[in-house]
């Protein structure tokens, strides 16, 4: 059978080649259209610029009047000094000083042997636990020396029990506790420097009242001399159980 179409005359056989050539041609024309530049002729003006020649300006010379230099200082004429030889011996006058030196004043002071130096009494406090002769509570004078501390303690406790009075205000408020009293027995046997420390001011005042009723004592002695003796006494305020 003979085909009706000639295969050499088939149009679609080289279609891809024709497409590629047409695409390149279009791209070339598009690139030329984008790169094409135009200018407005009205804004462009050609002209010749004339440059003037530079002028050389002459600077005038100015003369300044310089003041003349100051005159030189006058020359001082030096007087000639004539040296005269001293041929005569002049006796110098010696002036004796009328001032009194420190050594002379010390020599006039009274000698140390003529000065009566008195002993300075110092208020020395010796604790009750280490003092040689403890203070004597009235009634302990005839007790042996080894038992005087115990006698003092017993008399002190008896004095507190005898004068003890629980404050009514402290009872109503339920105040209780221990009050520490510190006082000093002076070299004259007086009770001085009373200090208290406790849970409340009411109890401290009562403890101070009890100590204020202590009698005058025979002072304690250290090396045979009366001295101050501090003493601490605890007073316990305790309510009776109902």
Image: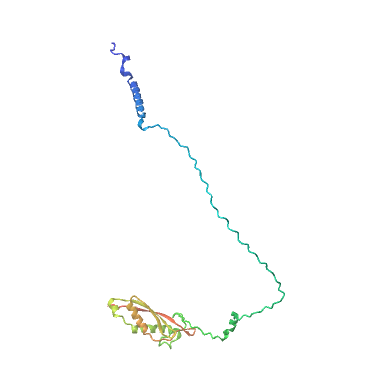
Q: Please, which residue is most extreme toward the right here? A: 87
Which residue is found at the position 29% from the left and 79% from the top? 169
Taking 68 as reference, is 183 left or right? left
Which quarter of the picture shows residue 163? bottom left
Q: Please, which residue is most extreme toward the top here? A: 1
Which residue is found at the position 42% from the left and 80% from the top? 230
Q: Please, which residue is most extreme toward the bottom here? A: 142
- Looking at the picture, tell me which residue is in the foreground, 148 or 204: 204
- Looking at the picture, tell me which residue is in the foreground, 18 or 102: 102
Which residue is found at the position 38% from the left and 83% from the top? 156
Q: Is residue 205 visible?
A: yes
Classify 141 as above or below 25: below
- Looking at the picture, tell me which residue is in the foreground, 7 or 22: 22
x and y, in percent, of residue 52 in the image? 46, 37
Classify 58 as above or below 7: below
Q: Which quadrant does the N terminus fall into?
A: top left
x and y, in percent, of residue 167 in the image? 30, 80
x and y, in percent, of residue 147 in the image? 43, 84
Q: Which quadrant does the C terminus fall into?
A: bottom left
Report the number of discs. Answer: 0
x and y, in percent, of residue 224 in the image? 49, 85
Q: Is residue 40 visible?
A: no
């Amino acid at each position: 059978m003979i085909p009706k179409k000639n295969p050499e005359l088939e149009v679609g056989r080289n279609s891809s080649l024709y497409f590629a050539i047409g695409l390149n041609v279009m791209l070339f024309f598009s690139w030329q259209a984008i790169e094409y530049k135009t200018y407005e002729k009205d804004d462009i003006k050609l002209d010749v610029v004339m440059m003037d020649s530079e002028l050389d300006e002459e600077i005038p010379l100015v003369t300044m009047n310089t003041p003349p230099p100051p005159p030189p200082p006058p020359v001082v004429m030096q007087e000639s000094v004539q040296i005269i030889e001293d041929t005569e011996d002049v006796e110098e006058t010696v002036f004796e000083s009328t001032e009194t030196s420190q050594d002379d004043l010390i020599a006039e002071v009274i000698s140390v042997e003529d000065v009566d130096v008195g002993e300075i009494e110092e208020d020395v406090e010796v604790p009750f636990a280490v003092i040689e002769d403890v203070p004597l509570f009235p009634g302990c004078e005839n007790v042996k020396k080894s038992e005087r501390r115990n006698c003092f303690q017993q008399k002190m406790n008896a004095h507190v029990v005898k004068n003890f009075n629980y404050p009514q205000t402290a009872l109503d408020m339920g105040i209780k506790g221990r009050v520490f009293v510190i006082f000093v027995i002076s070299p004259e046997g007086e009770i001085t420097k009373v200090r208290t420390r406790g849970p409340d001011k009411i109890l401290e005042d009562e403890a101070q009242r009890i100590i204020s009723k202590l009698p005058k004592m025979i002072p304690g002695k250290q090396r045979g001399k009366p001295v101050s003796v501090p003493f601490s006494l605890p007073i316990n305020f305790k309510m009776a159980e109902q």
